[in-house]
Image: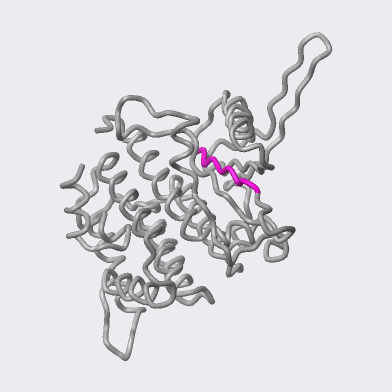
């Protein structure tokens, strides 16, 4: 579907980011707002306004086409029973000189529809050192405008600080930076980094179901491009995971964590809808096998087959 490897990789990473943002959105807020638990009513959950975005930014005729906006999330505040704001997140993986213009376009269209406060974030996952858009300016004959947004450059983040954090979003950023660094490393060096990350993740003071999601993110985002090392990675994870002294494969480990997630959180209709949408996007936009998609999303192969049948 995507002739150029760069386009395929970019599409894959975009899908992975969209998924992990929903899985750990509370940690995203805590990462950027240390007083998030005071500012926001996190117990009320979040509303992902993807369907409403279709109205603001209609996709092209291709049903599997990508929309520019990544996430628009309704977040409840503690300062009133019905007080809420919007969080707009755009994950940008390449240099684009029109990016700030786009961010402003998203902002005014969102404002026009909702008339609610909006905070906008650009998560920049590219490897261009001097690329850091953070504002859009325009002036004409005495009329001027300056729109600023939160700009977060993954490449500029300290690996030491990220590795010491138990915030799951910090770990997602560290995984992303590892993939960027990996472009300059040999496949063997990248493999060792990936193993180190996986081992640290499994020992983090993070809910197990979130560790499972982060392990999936690591598995698919940091690509070795070497089948033998991919197999060796799974075997190494088998050796470090031990439940009741019974060795488990990487896939069994993830399935165990997903089952625990079901016990800890309950299987909601919202999660079912998100899983369905995620599987559909992967089927349309990637070349992953049904087994790989099932592992990535945390569902059964039968579930993937059913979604494909309905496409």
Q: For the C terminus, which image quadrant?
A: top left
Task: Determine if the magenta segment contains residue 278.
Answer: no
Q: Is residue 157 above or below residue 50?
A: below
Instruction: Determine the residue located farthest toward the front in the rendered image.
Output: 81
**Percent of width and height locating residue 208:** 44, 74
Task: Determine if the magenta segment contains residue 88.
Answer: yes
The residue lying at 62 percent from left, 57 percent from top is: 29
**Percent of width and height locating residue 114:** 61, 38
**Percent of width and height locating residue 271:** 39, 60
Magenta residues span 85-92
Count all numbered tags in the image, as a single digit.
Answer: 0
User: Which quadrant of the view contains residue 110?
Assistant: top right
Q: Is residue 139 left or right of residue 283?
A: right
Q: Is residue 191 above or below residue 287?
A: below
The residue lying at 60 percent from left, 64 percent from top is: 42
The residue lying at 57 percent from left, 50 percent from top is: 74
Q: Is residue 263 above or below residue 49?
A: below
Q: For the N terminus, which image quadrant?
A: top left
**Percent of width and height locating residue 274:** 38, 53
Helix, strand or loop: magenta stretch: strand
Q: Is residue 20 left or right of residue 6?
A: right
Instruction: Determine the residue located farthest toward the top in the rendered image.
Output: 141
Q: Is residue 22 above or below residue 11?
A: below
Q: How are the colours assigned in the image?
A: one colour
Instruction: Determine the residue located farthest toward the bottom in the rendered image.
Output: 244
User: Which quadrant of the view contains residue 191?
Assistant: bottom left
């Amino acid at each position: 579907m995507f002739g150029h490897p760069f386009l395929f990789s970019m599409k894959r990473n975009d899908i992975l980011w969209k998924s992990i943002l929903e899985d750990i959105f509370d940690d995203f807020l805590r990462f950027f707002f240390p007083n998030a638990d005071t500012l926001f009513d996190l117990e009320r959950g979040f509303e992902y306004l993807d369907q409403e975005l279709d109205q603001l930014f209609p996709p092209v005729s291709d049903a599997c086409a990508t929309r520019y906006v990544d996430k628009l999330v309704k977040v409840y505040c503690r300062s009133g029973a019905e007080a809420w704001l919007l969080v707009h997140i755009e994950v940008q993986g390449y240099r684009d000189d029109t990016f700030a213009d786009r961010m402003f376009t998203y902002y005014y269209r969102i404002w026009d529809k909702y008339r609610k406060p909006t905070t906008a974030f650009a998560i920049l996952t590219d490897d261009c050192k001097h690329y850091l858009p953070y504002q859009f300016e325009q002036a004409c004959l005495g009329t001027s405008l300056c729109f600023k947004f939160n700009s977060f450059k993954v490449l500029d983040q300290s690996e030491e600080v990220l590795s010491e954090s138990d915030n799951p979003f910090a770990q997602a950023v560290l995984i992303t930076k590892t993939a960027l660094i990996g472009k300059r490393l040999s496949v063997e060096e990248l493999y060792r980094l990936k193993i180190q990350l996986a081992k640290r993740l499994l020992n983090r003071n993070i809910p197990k179901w979130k560790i499972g999601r982060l392990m999936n993110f690591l598995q698919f985002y940091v690509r070795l491009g070497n089948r033998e090392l991919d197999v060796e990675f799974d075997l190494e994870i088998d050796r470090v995971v031990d439940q009741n002294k019974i060795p488990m494969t990487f896939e069994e480990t993830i399935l165990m964590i997903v089952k625990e997630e079901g016990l800890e959180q309950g299987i909601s209709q919202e999660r079912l809808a998100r899983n369905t949408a995620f599987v559909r996007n992967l089927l349309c936009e990637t070349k992953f096998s049904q087994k790989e998609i099932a592992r990535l999303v945390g569902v059964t192969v039968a579930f993937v087959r059913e979604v494909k049948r309905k496409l």
